[in-house]
Amino acid sequence: MKRSGLALLGLAAATFAAAAAQQQPAQVNNAAITAEGYPAKLSDYGFFTDLARRTPARRVVGYDLETALFSDYAAKQRFIYVPAGAKATYDPAKAFDFPVGSALIKTFGYGEGASFKPLETRLLLRRAAGWVAIPYVWNAEGTDAVIRRAGTRLAVTFTDPSGKPRQISYAVPNQNQCKDCHALSGQITPIGPKARYLNHNGQLQKLAAAGLLDRAPAGAPRVARWDDAKAPLEARARAYLEINCAHCHNPAGAASNSGLFLELDRKEAVTIGIGKRPVAAGRGSGGRDFAIQPGDAEASILIYRLRSTDPGIAMPELGRATAHDEGIALLSQWIDSMPVR
């Protein structure tokens, strides 16, 4: 039986529409972000059209930080998602104010480019009642990740930047530990997506152009890159301390009772540890008197605790099984350069 021209035209149109739909980026599962509970798999969110390659879906935009938190030399792939019809609100000092339905997606792993092997993905999901945090652990094939609310440990072998081979028990935090690091005045708060960390390589403008951020002002603040030898030493050291320590060491953070506050805008020498005695002396002090002993890094509690991997001494308390040799060298250089009091 012959089909009419009209029927054939309709069939062709339907075929074209179907093909066009297949070429469109998949949409994120907004309900998975905002509803109670958590999906069992990372793929259930739809953040990526090709999860194994972390190919972002519509309105999922990659970003990185000028100076980033050290996490056992792991590489990180970061993405922001903001739902259609909404935008994050720019702030010159604090983390951007993200609308309900937004997500921050951070995958940790080792290797570069095509050799990158994902270990875990941590999600911050913006719900009506506030942010929630949840970790997912990748399968051996690198095709998907499953929820691990209780966290876990993974045996990891890698080579650090100096060429030294390392074997560690990598810790995926449990859900409560995620809350601890991101706590600000008792509420979970993003740490990285701030103007001063994103203001490089046109990232603020990219987010604004993609409709995820309401504006990208000229003259936005910018933090120093910790490993940029051309930048001032103090600026690099303070940037390193802020991103690695200030999420707890601030008046509204988990270490508020320490009196050691390491935000970038702090000016008082004793507040940032220079000549500051610990609130409670113990084995965490290593027999040293001051958090920072000007002119003497080895006599400084700060360096002692950053170098240690003992769970009762190490700082930060979570997120590392190794010492960051390069970061410690930077801070030691800064402290040694200080005039002796």
Image (cartoon, rainbow, N blue to C red):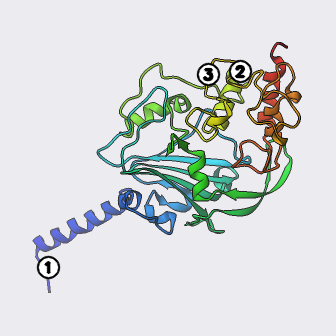
Q: From what the image shows, is residue 147 above or below residue 293?
A: below
Please name the residue that numbered disc 3 is placed on. Answer: 266
Tell me how many marks there are.
3
Left or right of 128, for residue 93 = right
Give the residue type that dot 1 points to: Arg
Task: Work out which quarter of the rendered image holds the N terminus and state it.
Answer: bottom left
Precedes in sequence: disc 3 or disc 1: 1
Q: Report x, y in % for residue 31.
A: 36, 61
Mark 3: secondary structure = loop
Mark 2: secondary structure = loop
Q: Which mark is residue 270?
A: 2
Judged by depth in the image, the label closer to the viewer, 1 or 2, is 2
Residue sitting at x 73%, y 25%: 273
Judged by depth in the image, the label closer to the viewer, 3 or 1, is 3
Q: CA distance from mark 1 to mark 2?
A: 86 Å
Task: Work out which quarter of the rendered image holds the C terminus and state it.
Answer: top right
In this view, the residue farthest toward the front is: 280
Left or right of 8, for residue 117 = right
Q: CA distance from mark 3 to mark 2?
A: 10 Å
Q: Report x, y in % for residue 150.
A: 61, 64
Q: From what the image shows, is residue 296 above or below residue 27?
A: above
167 or 290: nearer the eye?
A: 290
Precedes in sequence: disc 1 or disc 2: 1
Q: Residues within 10 Å of mark 1 (few under 14, many from 20)?
A: few
Residue contact at pointers 3 and 2, CB within 8 angstroms = no
Q: Which quadrant holds residue 218?
A: top left
Q: Report x, y in % for residue 209.
A: 38, 35
Residue contact at pointers 1 and 2, CB within 8 angstroms = no
Q: From what the image shows, is residue 72 above or below residue 9?
A: above
Please name the residue that numbered disc 1 is placed on. Answer: 3
